[in-house]
Amino acid sequence: MTGALVIVLILTTFFTAGGISLLASGELPGLPLAVGGAVLQIAAIVLVVATLGIRRTLDAHTVARSSLLAARRTARWVRRIALVTLLALVGYGLVRLVLGDPWSLITACIIDIGLFLLARGSKAIGLAQEQALNPRAT
């Protein structure tokens, strides 16, 4: 899990740093990259920390229910934040498109791919945690 986090952080750093560089030079199409990249990085760290919290409670092939509940809540919040960010960036891109700037929508769509995958993965994590909490419901 930590190895995957390092890879995600390295890959998304290019988007975040590129977006910040564009914004610093006055280019508004960099905003989706900067914001979306930062959300991706922070959300990945939050998911890994929540998962490691579950692992810390591992005892004889069982985990503490409280840590699993906290991780499930975290996964749900990460999903919500990723989806809200995705929609906000698409909205920003559409407004900029109407104003004559197609590049903001293009950069928003590029970073939204990562946000969509993060939201989808968070949903899968939440469902797996729900299954672990309610094994009879499956």
Image (cartoon, rainbow, N blue to C red):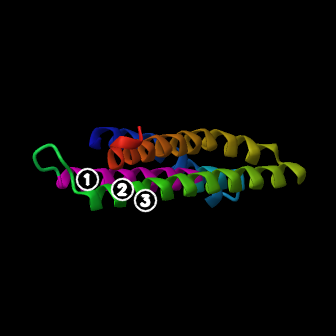
> Considering the numbered disc 3 on the image, is that residue within a helix, a strand or a loop?
helix
- Label 1 to label 2: alpha-carbon separation: 7 Å
Marks 1 and 2 in Cβ contact (< 8 Å): yes
The residue wearing badge 2 is: 71
Q: Are marks 1 and 3 in contact (CB under 8 Å)?
A: no
Q: Is residue 9 magenta?
A: no
Q: Position of residue 13 (x, y in %)?
A: 46, 47
Q: Which mark is residue 54?
A: 1
Give the percent coordinates (x, y) of residue 85: 62, 55
Relative placement, left or right, of 135 versus 84 is left
Q: Is residue 41 left or right of residue 133?
A: right
Residue type at mark 2 is: Ala
Q: Amino acid at mark 3?
A: Arg
Residue position for label 3 = 73
Q: Depth check: 101 or 65 in front?
A: 65
Verify whether residue 49 appears in magenta. Answer: yes
Q: Residue at x 75, y 45 (%)?
A: 105
- Quadrant of res 23: bottom right
* Cα separation between marks 1 and 3: 13 Å
What residue appears at the point 61 percent right and 43 percent down from the top-left corner?
111
Dominant secondary structure of the residues highlighted in magenta in the image? helix
User: Which amino acid is tagged 1?
Assistant: Ile
Q: Is residue 21 left or right of residue 125?
A: right
C-alpha span from label 2 to label 3: 5 Å
Please state, as top left, top right, bottom left or bottom right, where the N terminus lies in the image.
Answer: top left
The residue segment tinted magenta is 36-57
Q: Are marks 2 and 3 in contact (CB under 8 Å)?
A: yes
Mark 3: few/some/many CA within 10 Å (<14, 14-19, 20+): some
